[in-house]
Amino acid sequence: MPAKLGKVLERNPHLSIYMQKYAQETNQTPKFVDTLSKDISKESHVDVVYPVGDPIFIHLHGSKDMGQHYDVIQPEMTEDVTKQYNRVVDRIFVESHKEKIHVTDEEFNEVLDRLLGDIVKVSERGAPSKLVQLFKPSSKIYLSPDEMKLVEYYVKRNILQNGVLEPVLRDPYIEDIHCVGVREINLYHKILGMVETNIRFSELAELDKYTKSMSERMGRPASLSRPIIDGALPDGSRINIVYANDVSVSGPSFTIRKFSTEPLSSAQLAGWNTLSSQEAAYLWLCLENGMSVFVCGETASGKTTLLNAIFPFIPYDQKIFSAEDTLEVQPPHSVWQQLSTREFGPEDSKVDTFALLRSGLRSRPNYIVVGEIRGKEGNVAFQAMQTGIPVMATFHAASVKRMIQRFTGAPISVPVTSMDNLNVAVFLAGVYRGGKLIRRVLSIEEILGYSEAMGGVMTRAVFVWNPVDDQHIFRGMNNSFILEERIAVKRGFKDKRDIYKELALRAKILDKMKEMNMTNYKTVNDILRAFQKEGVSGLPFTV
């Protein structure tokens, strides 16, 4: 047994018990790893255990043919300990009113530690006899050290953290969480795809309580009169709740899109071929020079991921104004005015994205960001572009034709002659290759303008994805309207074609980041900022 695993098992005896039991039942011993390799998706059979933070571990096992399973390994409470846990929780809620109101999770953790210290007496001998308690009465609940560890874990997991979902919300390899009524929860694993878990709610009442509690934590309480809730958990993960049984036939249900603490970088996405270095360089030039860019695609195509990845292309000293109903955008700029809608309360106190954008027009931003355009706020976004303020946004549309149809139709109703205020639209999709879901930029379209003779809005695909060889093709070489007529003119190039040399330089910089494995978001942002300040001489490598 490796020394490291020995220490892990010593700290977590429940993991040792689980692995021994599994080995007895299957005659197989799972491989313990710190991190997962993407290569496991190619294996016919998977059997690995990995940590997501003591005392929680994940066991992936199974085959592609028979199905792959995701089992959470965590300490289990006996019936007696569960009774003691319930007593402790009841006392915590009784005593908590005496505590100061906490603001941060750290303060909440301190409150729980203090309450546990007041309520619980840790003793190897257990509770004193009834005779002793008769003469020396104590309000303490007596627990052994091992029982105390268990109770403390579940108290903090269920009150401070995310309850039964805490293990999967900790797991960096999880993308989506799906709960439909009282049945095993399903997950979309970034490497293995959809897997079934050993996590479930024992009864509808428990699920009902949990979904209602989550909605209240977001400040958007679910009820029979308001059964559908969209919002974000404290860690930023996006959640959709359908609360009422008559609406969600199998019982309350919810879907969670996991939030990444650090966004993915443009260099990382280029390394995965989500887009090419040349496409990223094109977007770099666009955003550096004040072009309006919309990121479009279907649900779960990677729109917000790409939007966050390309924010560092905007010069570091610009003011960013963002308006969202679910907080997801993460520009790295120091001057960032982040506004969120208010959907609840009296009618005259509600604030929608439309109102936020109108406010944004008065705050003199260099860039306006709309988390997602759905309705009439799209018209305000185009008004902002007409005043000279560039706009970035995500939008649900699978093609440039559909995008134009949606923007020019109700309820957005942008005049078709105004569509050329938008400069560039990027289209993404989730596609399956070899049984695995991957994200790809399908095309980057330039909006040229409205032509009465042509009977509509003229567009040009400067990049397209070839699914046969998984390559991104640059059709805009010496033929890009935005690069030549907008950016080259703005920068005063004598020969407009010199803009393609700038494009090549930025593509080389991104390729160098990939080559030197300098791809995490902060590193990429620092490199781009140095380039914005000092040019090529500010780079930490030669190109």
Image (cartoon, rainbow, N blue to C red):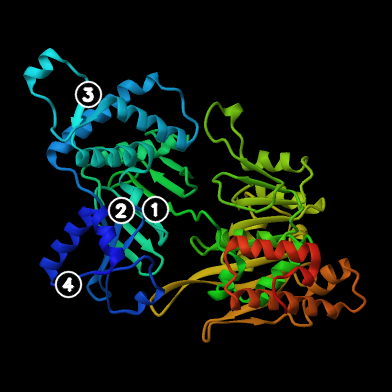
In the rendered image, is residue 71 in sight?
Answer: no
Q: Amino acid at mark 3?
A: Lys
Q: Nearer the viewer, residue 454 or 385?
A: 385
Name the residue beneath numbered marker 1: 170
* Disc 2 to disc 1: CB gap under 8 Å: yes
In the rendered image, is residue 312 in sight?
Answer: yes
* 21 up-or-down from 87: above or below: below
Image disc number at residue 56? 2
Q: Amino acid at mark 1?
A: Arg
Q: Earlier in the sequence, mark 2 or mark 1?
A: 2
User: Which SS class for mark 4?
Assistant: loop
Image disc number at residue 140? 3
User: Which SS class for mark 2?
Assistant: loop
Name the residue beneath numbered marker 4: 28
Judge left or right: residue 492 versus residue 404.
Answer: right
Q: Earlier in the sequence, mark 3 or mark 1?
A: 3
Cα gap from disc 2 to disc 4, whole angstroms: 21 Å
Q: Dot 1: within a 10 Å radius of its alpha carbon, few (fewer than 14), some, or many (20 or more) residues?
A: some
Judge left or right: residue 54 versus residue 279.
Answer: left
Split into 4 quadrants, where in the image is the N terminus? bottom left
Q: Amino acid at mark 4?
A: Gln
Q: Earlier in the sequence, mark 2 or mark 4?
A: 4
